[in-house]
Image (spheres, rainbow, N blue to C red):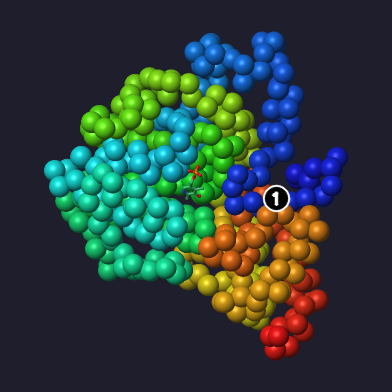
Amino acid sequence: MGDLRDEKKFVINFSAGPAKLPEAVLRQAQKEMLDYQDTGVSVMEMSHRSADFSKILNTTEQNLRELLDVPDNYKVMFLQGGGTGQFSAVPLNLMKLKPGHTADYLVTGTWSAKAANEAKKYGTVNMVLPATKKYTSIPDASTWNLNPEASYVYYCANETVHGVEFKDIPETNGVPLVCDMSSNILTRPVDVSKFGVIFAGAQKNIGCAGVTVVIVRDDLIGQAMDVCPSVFDYKVQSSNNSLYNTPPTYSVYIMGLVFNWIKSQGGVASMDHNSQVKSSTIYNVVEESDGFYCCPLDPKCRSRTNLPFRIGSIEGNDSLEKKFLEEATKAGYLQLKGHRSVGGIRVSLYNAVSVEEAHLLAGFMRNFIADNRHLLDTPAQ
Ligand SMILES: *Cc1c(COP(=O)(O)O)cnc(C)c1O
């Protein structure tokens, strides 16, 4: 069962982002494309201040609040600029919270490294973890260099490129915690009350590109730097219900359809369960491959949504990885190439990828071992 699109050729999309959307969502969008619920117009053609769009916006916010159990003292905004926009918006809004204008950054991969670099434009950035280029583990919390005077502590819950995922929420002893959840939001329950700010670009787990969810605790709003652009100012945007300027209306609509779909599937608890099953299905093939597949990551922080691995050794075997990707693509398993900075293979298992689809890929991976193990034993040319 599930989501195999029978009218076209067999494919399963394992893209890291923009990523697969549930088929039911695309079908509903298709059905409503020209005429949204008897309005005679497409959502794309509606005023963002119309009653019809207001309803879409408010329902989408309500559903997100319900799915994530967002407390009443948090504002929810739907903004443009992507996750990368928030790399600037976060320091622009929060750096001045304390007089030192410093912020703590936990850098565990490409995305948090980019965020830290951006923040340096607006204040002093304190690196909580020792510098590394490997990004395969999270140093033990007892070794962290946290500054009690920091305006905020920043981390990325799931590093999409390197596959490092936090299993626990960092303890900051009262300093507001900011989290980039772009690639694992709504894949597991989170206690929102532990956070100052949560943000996520939609195009990985919850929609299409163009909209970024930003959830901010009330007391952190209203202290933006003077240079903060109005479109990024949490006070301006939250007091205008994300309508200070035109929001990405169609992307909000698609995200709303995804939230409905998640609810229909049993909510975050069921996404969490599926995520657990899908990721262990793939990691088990790696673990049981007797060194054919190698995952460089510390098992304690292996991502459930982005699973990087190599073939042959941690350094990878170029010709076998190329063969794997060619045969996978031919068989319909799409977008499995690792990020260009890491190489190898990366399997992205966001909410729209079904358990059945993960099982099919696991089968392909097992068959690939059987057909190619002998090639590993021959010395490299
Ligand atoms: C994709 C991604 C981003 C960047 O998102 P954009 O919308 O391209 O700016 C930031 N953080 C994480 C964790 C991501 O996966």
The relative height of residue 213 versus residue 205 in the rendered view (above or below) is above
Report the residue at 53% width, 39% height from top. Answer: 202
Does the closest atom of ligand 1 sit within 8 Å of the Cβ of label 1? no
The residue carrying pointer 1 sits among few (fewer than 14), some (14 to 19) or many (20 or more) residues within 10 Å by Cα, namely many
Residue 34 sits in quarter:
top right
Percent of width and height locating residue 161: 52, 58
Residue furthest front in the image: 381
User: Does residue 302 show up?
Assistant: yes
- Does 10 sit left or right of 192 as displayed? right
Check the picture and name the quadrant holding the C terminus. bottom right
Q: Is 245 on the left-hand or right-hand side of 365?
A: left
Q: Which residue is mark 1?
A: 13
Mark 1: which amino acid?
Answer: Asn
Give residue 249's quadrant in the image. top right
Residue 73 showing in the rendered view: no
* Placement of 226 over or under 267, stated as above or below: above
- Residue nearer the viewer, 340 or 14: 340
Q: Residue at x 69, y 85 (%)?
A: 380
Seen at 86% across and 40% down, the residue is 7
Give residue 368's position: percent from left, percent from top.
Answer: 77, 71
Please provide percent x and percent y for residue 318: 66, 74
**Residue drawn at (68%, 33%) of the image:** 25
Q: Residue furthest left?
A: 99
Q: Mark 1: which secondary structure?
A: strand
Say whether residue 353 is left or right of residue 114: right
| Placement of 363 over or under 81, stated as above or below | below
Camera-side residue: 219 or 1?
Answer: 219
Q: Is residue 60 left or right of residue 336?
A: left
Residue 254, x across and y down, in percent: 61, 30
